[in-house]
Image (cartoon, rainbow, N blue to C red):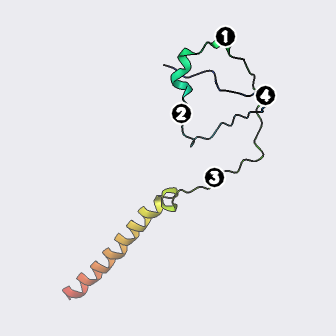
């Protein structure tokens, strides 16, 4: 097992194909050819060469759907500490008042 160094796909002769890459959130592809790859004769496959890497002008980055509290986890800890201080102050005042 290892990382594949080649891409194999069925291509039509008059079609143009684009390879998009660089999305860390993309799922790993799963193809039927993965099971049949060992039975293919690599010498009979037509080689293709990739053109230069260019940016996709139609690409729109996905919205960041990360919840606010996951982006800034310190807010929850700050709120907890603030509530502890406020409740501690209230409890201390009540204890001082009732002891008089």
Q: Report the side of 53 relative to 24 (left or right).
A: right
Q: Look at discs 1 and 4 and give the one toward the viewer.
A: 1
- Residue behind mark 3: 62
Crowding at label 3, few (<14), some or many (≥20) Cα neighbours within 10 Å? few
Could you tell me which secondary element the residue under label 2 belongs to?
Answer: loop
Residue 65, percent from left and from top: 56, 57
- Residue behind mark 4: 51
Name which of mark 3 and mark 2 comes first in the sequence: 2
Q: Report the side of 40 relative to 86 (left or right).
A: right
Is the Cβ of the residue at disc 1 closer than 8 Å to that at disc 2? no
Crowding at label 2, few (<14), some or many (≥20) Cα neighbours within 10 Å? few
Name which of mark 2 and mark 4 comes first in the sequence: 2
Q: Residue furthest top?
A: 43
> Which of the two residues, 90 or 6, is positioned nearer the viewer here?
6
- Residue behind mark 2: 30
Q: Look at discs 3 and 2 and give the one toward the viewer.
A: 2
Whole-Å distance between the Cαs marked 1 and 4?
Answer: 22 Å
Determine whether 34 is above or below 93 in the image.
above
Location of the C terminus by quadrant is: bottom left
Could you tell me which secondary element the residue under label 4 belongs to?
Answer: loop
Name which of mark 1 and mark 2 comes first in the sequence: 2
Q: Report the side of 40 relative to 82 (left or right).
A: right
- Residue behind mark 1: 43
Q: Look at discs 2 and 4 and give the one toward the viewer.
A: 2
Residue for point 66% across, 10% down: 43
Whole-Å distance between the Cαs marked 1 and 3?
Answer: 40 Å
Name which of mark 4 and mark 3 comes first in the sequence: 4
Could you tell me which secondary element the residue under label 1 belongs to?
Answer: helix
């Amino acid at each position: 097992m290892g990382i594949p160094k080649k891409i194999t796909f069925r291509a039509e002769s008059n079609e143009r194909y684009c390879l998009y890459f660089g999305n860390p959130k993309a799922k790993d592809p799963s193809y039927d050819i993965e099971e049949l790859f060992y039975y293919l004769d690599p010498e009979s496959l037509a080689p293709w060469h990739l053109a230069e890497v260019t940016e996709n002008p139609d690409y729109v980055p996905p919205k960041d759907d990360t919840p606010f509290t996951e982006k800034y986890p310190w807010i929850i800890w700050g709120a907890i500490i603030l509530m502890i201080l406020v409740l501690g102050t209230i409890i201390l005042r009540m204890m001082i008042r009732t002891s008089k």
